[in-house]
Image (spheres, helix red, strand yellow):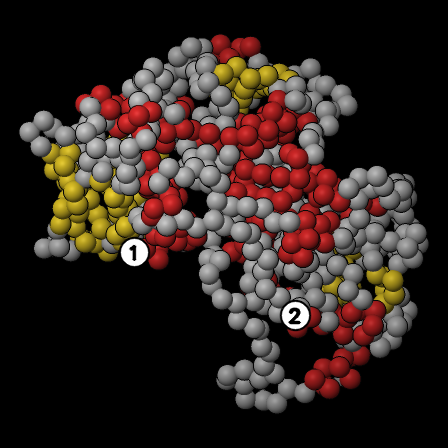
């Protein structure tokens, strides 16, 4: 499953001097007192922490956590909450939304898992997003405009991210979207009790306030041709999204009450779908299938429904479908919801905490079940889903399902929802289809063989919302270079935002001079940062490089999550995840180990036996430049490296 469970109990970390298989006695005295034979001296190496390396949006996670905890100070007159939010939104303009729904792969990669439990990165992001909305923070408009125009096709996370980054670079952006409102699957897929519409509207409006124009209700490919758009704009970004559902791949699966997850969720989010059948079967196993199941549990069913009130009529009826009668809805009762997956429950792709919520709400989850047929009555309506027990695994990127003969059974259903995948609608844009239901692009997300045409999000491959945001940002960089007439650069190996020490020095008033002649050494020069190297673009620091013994066992500060039972879930559309308080957010940020960047613990200064490591004077110090080394005193004993909790000190000078 895609995110660690809150219910997993953290175990204290223990350190063993000897490990299984050790045959020789290791004397720390030898390491300490004979280490002066080393020819190496400490250097200060900035690396990418694994949380950032795991973040598809490319957020500077360590950066904003260090601001929240008080290590990195904001400029005079700016609250730390705003400074942290601005650092976060350099990569992701939708933190309040993503703080709620992102499955947080950053937390799975967090080095703190080696101590007791991951840092609640997602919860701090949620807190900062809420602060920004409450305090009406906005993005600064660019100082200069480029005079160039860009069309963004699709107003989902990829399109909004690209529009945001391009507008910040001074380009005039117009978003085209076929829906009545922007947001894509954040609005028309994810239910409102997971992404409150007021929050989504606030974060979208902040992007529009940069001068971005929105043309909703306009579909490129039918209302306007792609050729017309390319003629009217200097560059085009394709963020079409995968808002088409995949039908069940079984015989007789074309019954009217067998629908796709995307059409089901759109009908619900449009307000058309107000109740479902008494028995609902959802086929899937990912987060979308959980969304469908929990929505169905909340909507419930009504007895003695008229033919026109059947849920499939609302799903297929479009915007003109009449709302269900309020008197009928007042009598609705709970629906029996069953979710089937070809994978075992513990191997489903859905977030584990979402699975736990679904089970608590009375949703039956049947793992290891593959659909093989839809049973229909004389009128052609589905009455049951026939399934068979199976064993499923991914092999070579392909799903392999081994059915177990003789294990077939029928699950009765009034409504069957297929949540087995999504597809891109290429109507009018067939030339872009690479034959696999996607668009072929290069590393800069420029469409192959199409100068000035870029893409991102589900048109490359359906994945997470945070992935689409990252695609939009990378494509915006490529579009900006294209508009400036520059060649498309090779993207860095570790393609994420990171702390900028030079910018921090300038922010403090410590300007860097230019180099006009060969120099010998940098200790007395302002033309370079002495004994420092930024390897963030190519190196992710593992936990083995940290001194984990520095960190005390500290439990994670968890958000309050409202868990409902079966009766409470019916007709309950209130938000379930509540943000941390300010004190909780700061306390959680302090659990961050700042992997790959100094967090000013003083260990190296305290333990250096030669007093070679010293604090930089306050007038010249800043984050990342807190300590320095006097190499005339250093004997290469590497104690400073051994006691550096963050792995910022590496023994390399002299190689």
For the point 40% across and 49% down, the residue is: 564
Task: Find residue 305 and report its horizontal and vertical position in percent.
Answer: 21, 27
Element type where label 2 sits in the image: loop
Q: How many residues crowd around disc 2 within 10 Å: few (fewer than 14), some, or many (20 or more)?
A: few
Q: Which of the marked residues, 1 or 2, is nearer the chain's N terminus?
A: 1
State the mark number for residue 59.
none
| Location of residue 109 in the rendering, given as x and y in whole percent from the top left corner | 54, 56
Residue 147 appears in the figure: yes
Q: Residue at x 26, y 52 (%)?
A: 366
**Along the line of sight, which residue is nearer the eye, 554 or 408?**
554
Q: Residue at x 92, y 52 (%)?
A: 619
The answer for how far apart the CA atoms under marks 1 and 2 are is 36 Å
Local crowd size for mark 1, using a 10 Å CA cut-off: few (<14), some (14–19), many (≥20): some
User: Which SS class for mark 1?
Assistant: loop
Q: Label 2: which residue? A: 552
* Residue located 72% across and 86% down the image: 30
Which corner quadrant holds the C terminus? bottom right
Q: Is residue 6 left or right of residue 388?
A: right
- Residue 198 on image: x %, y %: 55, 30
User: Is residue 263 visible in the rendered structure shown here?
Assistant: no
**Of labels 1 and 2, the one closer to you:** 2
Q: What is the quadrant of residue 43 in the picture?
A: bottom right
């Amino acid at each position: 499953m895609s995110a660690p469970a809150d219910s997993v109990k953290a175990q204290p970390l223990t350190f063993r001097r000897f490990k299984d298989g050790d045959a020789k006695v290791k004397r720390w005295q030898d390491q300490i007192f004979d280490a002066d034979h080393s020819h190496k001296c400490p250097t200060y190496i900035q690396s990418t922490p694994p949380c950032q390396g795991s973040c598809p949006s490319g957020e500077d996670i360590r950066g904003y956590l260090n601001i929240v905890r008080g290590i990195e100070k904001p400029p005079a007159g700016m609250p730390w909450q705003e400074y942290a939010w601005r650092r976060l939104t350099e990569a992701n303009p939708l933190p309040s939304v993503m703080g709620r729904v992102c499955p947080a792969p950053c937390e799975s990669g967090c080095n703190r898992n080696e101590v007791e439990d991951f840092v609640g990165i997602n919860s701090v992001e949620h807190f900062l997003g809420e602060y920004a909305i409450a305090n009406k923070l906005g993005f600064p408009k660019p100082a200069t405009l480029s005079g160039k125009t860009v069309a963004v096709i699709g107003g989902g996370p990829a399109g909004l991210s690209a529009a945001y980054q391009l507008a910040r670079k001074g380009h005039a952006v117009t978003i085209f979207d076929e829906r009545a409102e922007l947001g894509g699957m954040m609005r028309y897929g994810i239910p409102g009790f997971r992404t409150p519409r007021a929050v989504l509207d606030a974060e979208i409006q902040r992007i529009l306030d940069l001068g971005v124009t929105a043309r909703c209700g306009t579909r490129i490919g039918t209302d306007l041709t792609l050729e017309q758009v390319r003629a009217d704009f200097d560059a085009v970004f394709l963020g079409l999204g995968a808002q088409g559902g995949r039908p069940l791949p079984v015989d007789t699966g074309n019954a009217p009450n067998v629908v796709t997850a995307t059409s089901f969720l759109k009908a619900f989010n449009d307000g058309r779908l107000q109740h479902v059948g008494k028995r609902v079967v959802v086929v899937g196993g990912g987060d979308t299938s959980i969304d469908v199941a929990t929505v169905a549990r909340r909507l419930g069913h009504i007895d003695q429904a008229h033919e026109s009130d059947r849920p499939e009529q609302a799903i297929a009826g479009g915007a003109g479908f009449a709302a269900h009668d309020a008197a009928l809805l007042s009598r609705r009762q709970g629906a029996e919801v069953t979710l089937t997956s070809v994978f075992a429950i513990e191997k489903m792709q859905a977030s584990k905490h979402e699975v736990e919520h679904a089970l608590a709400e009375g949703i039956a989850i049947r793992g290891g079940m593959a659909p093989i047929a839809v049973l229909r009555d004389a009128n052609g309506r589905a009455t049951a889903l026939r399934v068979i027990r199976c064993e499923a695994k991914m092999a070579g990127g392909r799903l392999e399902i081994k059915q177990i003969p003789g294990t077939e059974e029928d699950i009765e259903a009034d409504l069957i929802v297929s949540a087995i995948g999504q597809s891109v609608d290429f109507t009018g844009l067939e030339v872009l289809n690479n034959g696999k239901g996607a668009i072929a692009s290069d590393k800069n997300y420029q469409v192959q063989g199409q100068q000035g045409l870029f893409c991102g999000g589900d048109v490359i491959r359906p994945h997470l919302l945070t992935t689409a945001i990252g695609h939009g940002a990378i494509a915006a960089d490529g579009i900006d270079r294209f508009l400036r007439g520059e060649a498309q650069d090779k993207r860095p190996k570790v393609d994420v935002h990171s702390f900028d020490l030079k910018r921090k020095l300038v922010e403090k008033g410590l300007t860097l001079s230019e180099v006009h002649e060969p120099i010998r050494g940098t200790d007395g020069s302002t033309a370079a940062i002495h004994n420092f190297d930024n390897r963030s673009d190519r190196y992710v620091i593992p936990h083995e490089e940290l001194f984990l013994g520095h960190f005390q066992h500290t439990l994670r500060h968890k958000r309050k999550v409202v868990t409902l039972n079966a009766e409470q879930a019916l007709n309950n559309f209130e938000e379930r995840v509540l943000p941390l308080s300010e004190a909780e957010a700061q306390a959680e940020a302090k659990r961050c180990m700042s992997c790959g960047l100094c967090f000013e613990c003083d260990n190296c200064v305290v333990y250096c036996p030669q007093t070679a490591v010293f604090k930089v004077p306050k007038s010249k110090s800043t984050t990342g430049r807190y300590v320095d080394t006097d190499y005339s005193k250093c004997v290469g004993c590497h104690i400073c490296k051994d006691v550096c909790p963050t792995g910022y000190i590496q023994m390399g000078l002299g190689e």
